[in-house]
Image (cartoon, coloured by chain):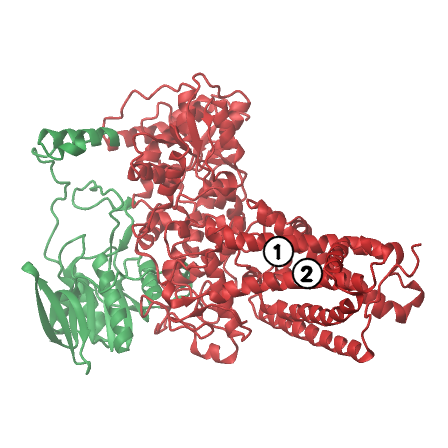
């Protein structure tokens, strides 16, 4: 029964000329495809070198993880199940139909020449083939329908193509919309024409029994027969449709490299090459300086091949756009548009700019932009008569590229808007690494002398005093004054835990209260810890992210030198920003440490019974995940465990965990002017918490958060109803820590002298209180 | 066009200043130093003028043994040359400094000599005028706007007087100017560039004799006495805020805010 008649003829009804014509057309389509992808590869080959392999095991793990993500569509499904399922249906439908076509090619074009007896496209194989292709083809069409419905009806903010950095009148992105619909429509046409073709074939052959295993074609054919389609008419229609289907398919192949369809190729690669340290560990400056000595990502020549692949990988899905706090607060930055601008600029330079690109009246992509803004002579270096910050004139003439990016295509205001919260990188389903690219361009801004005024003041203070508060670095330990039990100077005495305090915790008046509580809670739990006092300087995380690489190196080298004088087992810090750079970046500069966040230490202290709740904090609280804790360090459980341990009733905000929303202070933003924003991210976040209803405490676990949200609660008029508190303040209340009675009223100098004298003597005392082995 | 900028360092006010044991000077052991703010304005103006009119900018500082970073920063900002002048234990008084600068400038082409109008550590404002006198050049102090004439023989400068009146003065070149402010905030010098230059820069040096005296002797230095009418509020931020609120309430100021 399952003999060779259970099959179909591949080129049925086609003349030899017809077949030849088809092969010719296939060859042309393939050639166009290869030229298109070849152009891309040529572009990548001209990118700056970047080692994406590193150690081989890690590289392989990355590839495996990327492949798994692609296969499962897990990154697409994250936080958008609808889109994830629909995309998986389309993707797997397309892949299986493609494999189906490849099988036909093997059986028709290869088998007859190499092993005629091995012809296999019949019988049980044919039936299985028919079912699988029909089901997945249908899945693909349903996926396309779902996606079209989503685009038409859902009004998703991420699909809003309006730009946030330039006036809508200057830009025309209708090409983007057209491109999206052509892509979806083309795939739909491919599927529909395939099924129609199948139906016509079944009608023309008068419904052979085994074709019931092509269920979609069978049902469609039955419908056609019911409305009176004869076998002869069906055959004529089939031939016409066969050519149409072939044309649609071949044209699609040729069109892939020039459209968003290229993501089918670029995105698996990009996901496989994604670095788990993207944003967490920024690249050090190349050891070999550029010919003209410039630093950072200044022009398109400075883009690495991976950054070029990143740009091609973008599907305009807009998830970064919807997640970005800059977009939400009305700042002139959208990570989506930044990536699209880079892509369009580079493609225009390489003359592979596809149709349906963005058209702007204020600039022409591909031309080296007239040099930047700001200082006319910003690009000063020894002996140089600084002209403008633009690219060297000679370079642009030799090869494509060289368009000014930092301060040119991407304006300084756009680049300074980034909080480096990593929401874009976390949200991106295709592994684009926006933040390192933005920081790369900020490095160039700093190099060109185009520094935001507030940032310049902070840099100047940091370079001189090691803090951004304009305070003498020698007063860094002054917050310890008035503590009933002094804190050990870790430079003089061995400790288990080296507490790296950080700038805000040391100098900000509001945060100092929390800092003192941290010290007292640690002391209450018998934690053997010490600090570096005036030996500590800002760890440099946000300075690095603001693009001041030299200043970061200066601070890091200083801190590593101080840490090398101290003897300790682990580092603990309340500041997630500090945590990030100590953990991920200091090793590059010779300082490798085990670094804990204080929420992790607190959780462990409760766990081991070193801390115990005496008075439950029986209140409705919500917890704000700091970006640098939840996304960078991926710590989300520890602070929640602490809240549970103290008996708080935790109510989650809609955006929590790795999906947290930035307070707006990261990446150096805390030093910059934020008065131009429509609504500060921190204020939006407070509203999000207030909308939960009945929240008493807005709990944070980051010094900058404490200052940002204290201000935001007041600014939104919630200062009286909502208490912005650091985690430690709830813990201190829960363990019934006694308030400090003495108010240190003998003036700063007196207290300073006292504390300084106390370091030496009292330190010995503290050491005998034993080592907590948490 | 040769632009010369005269710079010096002053104590960083982020540090808490203390008087030394003799009571005639600051306790310098703990001090850190920054470039005098007005000298930075002078450098920024010189760089802007150089970029417009062409030429080069040369920065001069007296060699007190700790001016390398200052000079590297000048280069990082775009200066063309840096020169250390003489050899001094520490920053001398204006008369000595001016004599040293003038001696250096005698063998150095100069069309426009710019320096900060004064510095916070002596409020003397004399270096510019003294250099001008020694070199027999015209001098304008407290300059807020500088433009070099098209022929390069004159410069037009502004002085702002009380009551919002601005005078425009024309001065023949070469000349010296005491700069009050620059048209733009002094540009940022990236640390990586400064550090690189600290290693690689070429620093010129000029020998000068360090005689001459200021004719002034500091007899005593002290922190101003707390006046009887002022109340110093000490304590925690909360306590300070409470006290301020109480004082305001006492005097009937800002009642709504106090509540």
Q: Residue furthest top?
A: A614
Give coordinates of residue A663: x percent, y percent.
40, 43
Residue at the image point whose x is 40% and y is 45% from the top:
A538
Which quadrant holds residue A684? top left
Residue B162 percent coordinates (x, y): 6, 59
Question: Tag 1: Cα neighbours inside 10 Å, few (<14), some, or many (≥20)?
Answer: many
Sequence order check: which comes first, mark 1 or mark 2? Answer: 1
Q: Nearer the viewer, residue A270 or A481?
A: A270
Q: Residue A561, position in %: x, y?
A: 46, 45
Mark 1 falls within which chain? A
Residue matched to label 1: A144
Which tint was used for chain A? red
Q: Residues within 10 Å of mark 2 (few under 14, many from 20)?
A: many
Q: Position of residue A648 (x, y in %)?
A: 45, 24
Quadrant of residue B116 in the image? bottom left
Q: Is residue A701 left or right of residue A232?
A: left
Q: How many marks?
A: 2
Observer-nearest of A466 and A26: A26
Residue at x-position 31% and y-position 67%: A375
Label the green chain with its letter.
Answer: B
Local SS, label 1: helix
Quick one: quadrant of the C terminus of chain A?
A: top right
Cβ atoms at labels 1 and 2 below 8 Å apart? yes
Residue depicted at 44% across the width and 70% down the height = A359
From the image, tell me which residue sits under label 2.
Answer: A191
């Amino acid at each position: 029964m399952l003999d060779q008649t259970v099959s179909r003829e591949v080129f049925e009804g086609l003349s030899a000329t017809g077949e030849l014509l088809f092969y010719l057309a296939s060859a042309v389509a393939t050639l166009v495809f290869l030229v298109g992808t070849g152009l891309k590869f040529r572009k990548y080959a001209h990118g700056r070198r970047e080692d994406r392999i590193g150690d081989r095991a890690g590289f392989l793990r990355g590839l495996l993880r990327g492949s798994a993500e692609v296969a499962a569509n897990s990154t697409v499904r994250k936080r958008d199940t609808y889109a994830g399922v629909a995309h998986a249906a389309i993707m797997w439908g397309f892949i299986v139909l493609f494999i189906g076509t490849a099988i036909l090619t093997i059986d028709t074009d290869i088998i007859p020449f190499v092993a005629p007896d091995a012809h296999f496209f019949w019988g049980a194989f044919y039936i299985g083939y028919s079912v699988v292709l029909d089901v997945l083809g249908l899945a693909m069409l349903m996926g396309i329908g779902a996606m079209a419905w989503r685009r038409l009806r859902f009004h998703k903010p991420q699909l809003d193509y309006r730009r946030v950095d330039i006036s809508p009148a200057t830009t025309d992105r209708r090409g983007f919309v057209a491109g999206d619909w052509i892509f979806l429509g083309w795939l739909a046409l491919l599927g529909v024409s395939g099924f129609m073709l199948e139906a016509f074939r079944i009608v023309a052959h008068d419904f052979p029994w085994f074709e019931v295993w092509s269920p979609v074609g069978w049902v469609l054919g039955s419908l056609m027969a019911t409305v009176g389609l004869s076998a002869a008419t069906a055959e004529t229609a089939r031939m016409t449709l066969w050519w149409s289907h072939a044309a649609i398919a071949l044209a699609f192949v040729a069109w892939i490299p020039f459209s968003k369809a290229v993501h089918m190729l670029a995105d698996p690669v990009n996901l496989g090459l994604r670095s788990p340290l993207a944003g967490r560990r920024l690249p050090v400056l190349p050891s070999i300086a550029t010919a003209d000595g410039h630093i950072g990502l200044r022009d398109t020549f400075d883009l690495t091949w991976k950054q070029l692949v990143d740009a091609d990988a973008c599907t305009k899905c807009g998830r970064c756009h919807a997640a970005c706090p800059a977009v939400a607060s009305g700042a002139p930055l959208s990570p989506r548009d930044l990536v699209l601008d880079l892509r369009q600029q580079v493609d225009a330079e390489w003359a592979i700019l596809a149709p349906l690109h963005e058209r702007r009246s204020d600039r022409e992509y591909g031309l080296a932009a007239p040099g930047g803004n700001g200082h006319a002579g910003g690009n000063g270096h020894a002996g140089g008569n600084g002209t403008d910050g633009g690219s060297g004139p000679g370079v642009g003439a030799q090869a494509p590229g060289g368009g000014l990016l930092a301060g040119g295509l991407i304006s300084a205001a756009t680049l300074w808007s980034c909080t480096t919260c990593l929401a874009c990188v976390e949200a991106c389903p295709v592994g684009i690494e926006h933040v390192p690219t933005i920081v790369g361009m900020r490095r160039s801004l700093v190099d060109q002398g185009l520094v935001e005024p507030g940032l310049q003041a902070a840099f100047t203070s940091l370079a001189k005093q090691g803090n951004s508060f304009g305070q003498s670095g020698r007063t860094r330990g002054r917050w310890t004054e008035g503590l009933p039990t002094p804190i050990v100077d870790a430079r003089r005495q061995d400790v288990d835990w080296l507490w790296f305090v950080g700038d805000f915790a040391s100098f900000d008046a509001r945060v100092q209260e929390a800092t003192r509580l941290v010290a007292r809670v640690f002391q209450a739990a018998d934690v053997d810890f010490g600090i570096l006092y005036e030996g500590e300087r800002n760890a440099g995380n946000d300075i690095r992210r603001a693009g001041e690489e030299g200043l970061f190196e200066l601070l890091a080298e200083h801190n590593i030198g101080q840490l090398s004088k101290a003897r300790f087992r682990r580092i603990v810090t309340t500041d997630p920003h500090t945590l990030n750079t100590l953990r991920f970046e200091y090793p590059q500069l010779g300082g490798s440490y085990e670094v804990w966040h204080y929420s992790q230490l607190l959780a462990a202290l409760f766990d081991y019974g070193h801390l115990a709740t005496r008075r439950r904090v029986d209140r409705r609280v919500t917890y704000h995940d700091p970006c640098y804790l939840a996304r960078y360090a991926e710590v989300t459980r520890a602070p929640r465990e602490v809240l549970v341990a103290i008996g708080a009733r935790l109510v989650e905000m809609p955006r929590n965990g790795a999906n947290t929303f930035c307070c707006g202070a990261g990446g150096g933003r805390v030093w910059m002017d934020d008065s131009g924003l429509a609504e500060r991210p921190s204020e939006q976040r407070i509203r999000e918490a207030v909308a939960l209803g009945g929240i008493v405490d807005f709990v944070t676990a980051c010094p900058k958060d404490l200052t940002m949200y204290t201000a935001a609660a007041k600014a939104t008029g919630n200062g009286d109803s909502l208490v912005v508190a650091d985690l430690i303040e709830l813990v201190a209340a829960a363990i019934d820590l006694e308030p400090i009675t003495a108010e240190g009223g003998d003036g700063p100098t007196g207290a300073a002298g006292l504390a300084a004298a106390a370091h030496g003597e009292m330190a010995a005392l503290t050491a005998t209180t034993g080592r907590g082995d948490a | 066009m040769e632009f010369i900028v005269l710079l010096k360092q002053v104590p960083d006010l982020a540090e808490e200043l203390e008087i030394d044991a003799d009571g005639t000077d600051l306790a310098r052991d703990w001090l850190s130093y920054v470039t005098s703010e007005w000298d930075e304005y002078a450098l920024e103006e010189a760089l802007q003028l150089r970029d417009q009119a062409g030429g080069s900018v040369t920065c001069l500082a007296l060699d007190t043994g700790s001016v390398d970073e200052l000079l590297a920063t000048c280069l990082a900002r775009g200066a063309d040359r840096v020169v250390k002048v003489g050899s001094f234990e520490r920053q001398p008084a204006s008369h000595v400094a001016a004599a040293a600068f003038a001696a250096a400038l005698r063998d150095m082409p100069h069309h426009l000599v710019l320096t900060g109008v004064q510095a916070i550590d002596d409020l003397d404002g004399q270096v510019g005028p003294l250099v001008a006198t020694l070199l027999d050049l015209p001098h304008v102090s407290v300059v807020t706007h500088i433009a070099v004439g098209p022929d390069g023989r004159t410069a037009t400068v502004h002085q702002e007087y009380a009551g919002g009146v601005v005078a425009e003065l024309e001065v023949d070149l070469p000349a010296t100017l005491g700069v009050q402010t620059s048209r733009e905030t002094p540009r940022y010098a990236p640390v990586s560039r400064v550090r690189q230059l600290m290693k690689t820069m070429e620093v010129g040096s000029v020998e000068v004799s360090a005689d001459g005296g200021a004719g002034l002797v500091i007899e005593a230095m002290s922190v101003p006495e707390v006046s009887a009418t002022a109340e110093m509020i000490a304590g925690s931020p909360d306590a300070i805020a409470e006290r301020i609120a109480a004082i305001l309430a006492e005097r009937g100021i800002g009642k709504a805010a106090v509540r």
